[in-house]
Amino acid sequence: MRFVEANGARIPAIGLGTWELRERACARVVEQALKLGYRHIDTAQVYENEREVGDGLRASGVKRDDIFLTTKIWTTHFAPHDLERSAKESLVRLRMSEVDLLLLHWPNPHVPLAETLGALAHAKRQGLTRHIGVSNFTVALIEEAVALCPEPLVCNQVEFHPYLDQSKVKAACARHGMALVAYSPVAKGRIKTDGTLMRIGRAHHKTPAQICLRWLVQQNVSAIPRTSKIERLSENIDIFDFSLTDEEMREISLLHSPTGRLTDFAFAPKWD
Ligand SMILES: NC(=O)c1ccc[n+]([C@@H]2O[C@H](COP(=O)([O-])OP(=O)(O)OC[C@H]3O[C@@H](n4cnc5c(N)ncnc54)[C@H](OP(=O)(O)O)[C@@H]3O)[C@@H](O)[C@H]2O)c1
C-alpha cells in the first residue's frame, strides 16, 4: 500500500467508499475489504451506515491503529455546538473513541466558515479525531478555509476521475500540503467500457478500473472506490505492481470534458 502524506496525516492511497452500502451487506464488505488488505474506509453521517462500518471493522480482526477511518459531518450540524455533539454521536454509532479524519461534507454558506472550522479544530483538540479536512470545497473556499482554520487541514475530498479536470483544485491542495481524496474515482463504473482505458489495460494486463485508479494514485491522490462486490474489492486494490508511462498518464488526462462531472447536485444541500 502507498500512502499520501498530508500535513501530518498518512492516508492510504486506496480506500473503500461506503456510500449506499447498507446494513449487513455494508458490514460484510467492510470486513472483507480489511481482510483483503484495505486500510482506509470512508463513511459519513449522511450515509446512515456508521454503525455497520464499525461492525465490519471489528469483525475484520484488523487492529484499530492500522486502519484509517474517515467520517463526515453533515451540513445541518455546522453550528459549533451541533458539530461537537454530532461528531460524538458518530463515534457512538461507530463505537470508536476517535476517527482518523473528520470532514465537513459540503460547504454551508449559512454558517460562518470560521465558526465551523473553529469547532472542527476543537473536535481535533478534544481527541475526537486525529485529523480534520473538508470536502467539495472550491479553490476559493480552500484558500479561505486554510486562512481561517486554527489547525492544519489534511484534505479536500472531491469528485475526481479521468472525465473531470481537477487540476486547479489539486494544485490548491498541494500548495497547502493537503491531499486530494478522489471520490467517484471509477466514475461510478463508467470507466468499464472506456476504449482508451481498455487499450492501456491490455498492455498491462489490467482492467479499465485498475488503470483508472493507478492514474489517480500515480498523481499522489488517494482514491476511495466503492463496490458491493467482493471480487471487485481485490481488483480495485491490485494496482501497486505496475506503472503507467508518462505518455499513458497524459493520454488518460485528455479524457476530461466540461460535462464530465457526475455528482448529482440534487444530493447536495439546498440553501434556499
Ligand atoms: N464527499 C462527498 O460528497 C462524496 C460524494 C460521493 C461519494 N463519496 C465517497 O466516495 C465513494 C466512491 O464514490 P462513488 O460511490 O460515488 O463512485 P465510484 O466508487 O466511482 O463507483 C461506484 C460504482 O462503480 C462500480 N464499480 C466499483 N468498482 C468497479 C470495477 N472495478 N469495475 C467496474 N465497476 C466498478 C460499483 O458497482 P458494484 O457495487 O456493482 O461493484 C458502483 O456502482 C463513495 O462510496 C463515498 O464513500 C463522497
Image: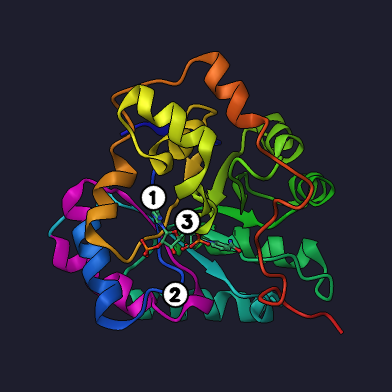
The residue that disc 3 covers is 189
Amino acid residing under circle 2? Glu
The spot of residue 32 in percent (x, y) is 19, 60
Reading the chain from its start, which is encountered first: label 1 or label 2?
1
Q: CA distance from mark 1 to mark 2?
A: 16 Å
The residue drawn where x is 52% and y is 37% is 195
Q: CA distance from mark 1 to mark 3?
A: 16 Å
The segment highlighted magenta reads 34-60
Q: Nearer the viewer, mark 2 or mark 3?
A: 3
Amino acid residing under circle 3? Gly
Give the colour scheme shown: rainbow
The residue drawn where x is 41% and y is 59% is 226
Beta carbon of the mark 2 residue lies under 8 A of ligand 1: yes
Q: Quadrant of the N terminus?
A: top left
**178 horizontally vs 222: left or right:** right
Q: Quadrant of the C terminus?
A: bottom right
- Assign the magenta stretch its main secondary structure: helix
The residue that disc 1 covers is 15
In the image, residue 52 lies in the stretch drawn in magenta: yes
Reading the chain from its start, which is encountered first: label 1 or label 3?
1
Q: Nearer the viewer, mark 1 or mark 3?
A: 3
Amino acid residing under circle 1? Gly
The residue drawn where x is 64% and y is 79% is 77
Q: Nearer the viewer, mark 1 or mark 2?
A: 2
Q: Which mark is residue 54?
A: none
The residue that disc 2 covers is 20
Beta carbon of the mark 3 residue lies under 8 A of ligand 1: yes
